[in-house]
Image (tube, rainbow, N blue to C red):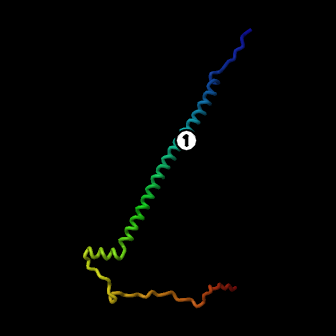
Amino acid sequence: MPAKRKHHSGAIGWVPALKTAIIVMLIATAAVGYVIEKNKLIELSKQITAREARLEKLRWENKLRASQLDDRLLPQKLAARVKEMRLNLVPAQQTQMVWLVEPCEPRRTNATPSLLVWTQ
């Protein structure tokens, strides 16, 4: 009696190995993509933190400069600076000033809103 042998094709053995290799490559690609995106998020987070710190510093400097400007615009400081620079400036005389009267809006005699009348 002849011995029963199973005849295997060479391609049949490669199919499971090929499927496994494809699945492993997909998982590896997803993992590498995840790591790359995570690194981008970390880098963006660092940039945001640095820019927020810079913004806070600029706001502080802005407040400092605004207070310095307010201080320099005080009438006493301006008068002292004029004397220091010897500009010989004096306040304007009353005859040198021209006063303009601002026209006011005419008052309405009827304070109620106007009504719309629809006729046909």
The quadrant of the picture occupied by the N terminus is: top right
Residue at the extreme right of the image, as rendered: 1
Residue 119 rendering spot, x and y as whole percentages: 68, 86
Few, some or many residues within 10 Å of mark 1 (<14, 14–19, 20+): few
Dot 1 lies on which element? helix
Quadrant position of residue 98: bottom left
Compared to residue 67, the image places residue 1 above or below, namely: above
Residue 86 lies left or right of residue 63; in this view the side is left
Compared to residue 14, the image places residue 66 above or below, namely: below
Compared to residue 75, the image places residue 23 above or below, namely: above
Residue 82 rendering spot, x and y as whole percentages: 29, 76
Q: Looking at this view, is 22 or 113 the one in front?
A: 113
Residue 53 rendering spot, x and y as whole percentages: 45, 55
Residue 37 rendering spot, x and y as whole percentages: 53, 44
Residue linked to disc 1: 34
Kind of residue indicated by mark 1: Tyr
Residue at the extreme left of the image, as rendered: 86
Compared to residue 23, the image places residue 60 above or below, namely: below
The quadrant of the picture occupied by the C terminus is: bottom right
Q: Looking at this view, is 73 or 15 the one in front?
A: 73
Residue 6 lies left or right of residue 45; in this view the side is right
Q: Looking at this view, is 26 or 98 the one in front?
A: 98
Quadrant position of residue 100: bottom left
Residue at image coords 56%, 38%: 31
Residue 49 lies left or right of residue 17; in this view the side is left
Residue at image coords 45%, 58%: 56
Residue at image coords 40%, 64%: 64
